[in-house]
Image (cartoon, rainbow, N blue to C red):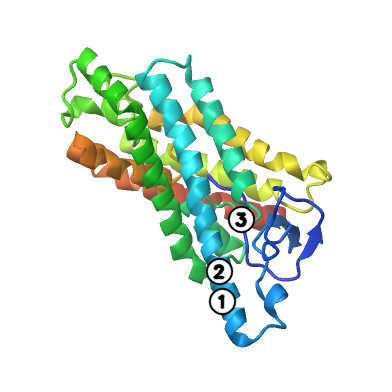
Amino acid sequence: MSFVSAGAEHTVSIPFRLALSVDPSASLRTLTGEHVVLQPKSPESTASRAPPSHQQGTRLSTEFRQYLAEFVATFLLVFFGIGAVSSGAIANALQGLWQVATVWGFGLALAIYVSSHISGAHLNPAMTLALAVWNEFPWNKVPGYILAQVLGALVAGAANLALYGSVIADFELQHNITRGSPESIRSAMAFGEYFPNPAAFSNPNLVSTQVAFIAEVLGTAILAFMIFSLTDRRNKTLAGSEAAIPFLIGFTVAVLISVIAPLTQACLNPARDIGPRIIAYYAGWGNVAFGPSSTFIVYYVGPIVGAQIGAGFQVMAFR
């Protein structure tokens, strides 16, 4: 789940900020090619008259802040999201899937506002790769962005365990669940994802690997298509209302979760999945935390393929 991109030529600033205080090395909303994007401003614009050593220091500092922004924003997104899953599926404090989906959507919007002026608010390896392929995001930054996203999700998983650990243990006790056993996916779903959704169906054969893969591909394709469409400069319906874009993307995610979550828990984001799974593995769920071997295909390959399809279709068909 992500927002916008970086790394294109011929940008023109639009007076729009997403924060009260923005570092001078970060850009405002810009126009690039056929898309409106939020991107980190090139450090050369603020350091062009400085000595070479100072220019290099500024560049490194800017890149670090971009990675840090991805880390913090992904942490917020996953913390809010899996916290809502724990609150709804484990603590039974939320009523219905839509409430969980809404928290995910609002959490994404807030994460975008926090980071978009610094890093572009990718928050998702699948979107980072799509932006690199279809919107000229620098390939040399891709590994750092993905690492920051995974680490942010991992820390969010640790925070969720710290907050809900005793609640999850009580849930397992009440339902006679032994952590690490196959049935413990009912509690492990507070971290990683499984198909079919353990909270929706008791029959594990209702959703095949093929259906789960298609669901993740289709869901992420729609998400990428919407992100590229909402940031398209020719989309005049949003003229003067750019501040609403994060909420529209968050609403898109909430709708997708409402449709896909009963099948696969609606991953759409490899970082969101792998980070908390690692925490669950070391918290006692062991191999159950990572599920069957098909998990890799469904939750990692699926979103990456889907994002390429959705972004590519928007660029080739609607530009």
Query: What separation in Å lies between label 3 and label 1 (alpha carbons)?
Result: 21 Å
Give the mark toward the camera: 3 or 1.
1
| Dot 3 and dot 1 residues touching (CB under 8 Å) | no
**Secondary structure at numbered mark 3:** loop
For disc 2, the marked residue is: 61
Note whether residue 200 is visible: no
Q: Amino acid at mark 3?
A: Gly
Picture disc at residue 57: 1
Please report the residue visible at 19 percent of the width from the left and 35 percent of the height from the top.
284
Q: Vertical placement of 173 versus 251: above or below?
A: above
Residue 157 in view of the camera: yes
Distance of label 2 from label 3 (alpha carbons):
16 Å
Q: Is residue 190 left or right of residue 18?
A: left
Q: Residues within 10 Å of mark 1 (few under 14, many from 20)?
A: few
What secondary structure is found at the residue carrying circle 2? helix
Amino acid on which disc 2 is placed: Ser
Is 36 left or right of 216, judged from the image as shown? right
Is residue 193 toward the left or the right of residue 123 in the image?
left
Q: Earlier in the sequence, mark 3 or mark 1?
A: 1
Q: Nearer the viewer, residue 63 or 201?
A: 63
Residue 213 position in % (x across, y down): 39, 41
Q: Secondary structure at mark 1?
A: helix
Which one is closest to the eye, mark 2 or mark 3?
2
**Residue contact between numbered discs 2 and 1, judged by CB atoms under 8 Å:** yes
Q: Nearer the viewer, residue 238 or 40?
A: 40
Q: Which residue is mark 3?
A: 120
Position above or below: 120 against 302:
below
How packed is label 3: few (under 14 Cα within 10 Å), some, or many (20 or more)?
A: many
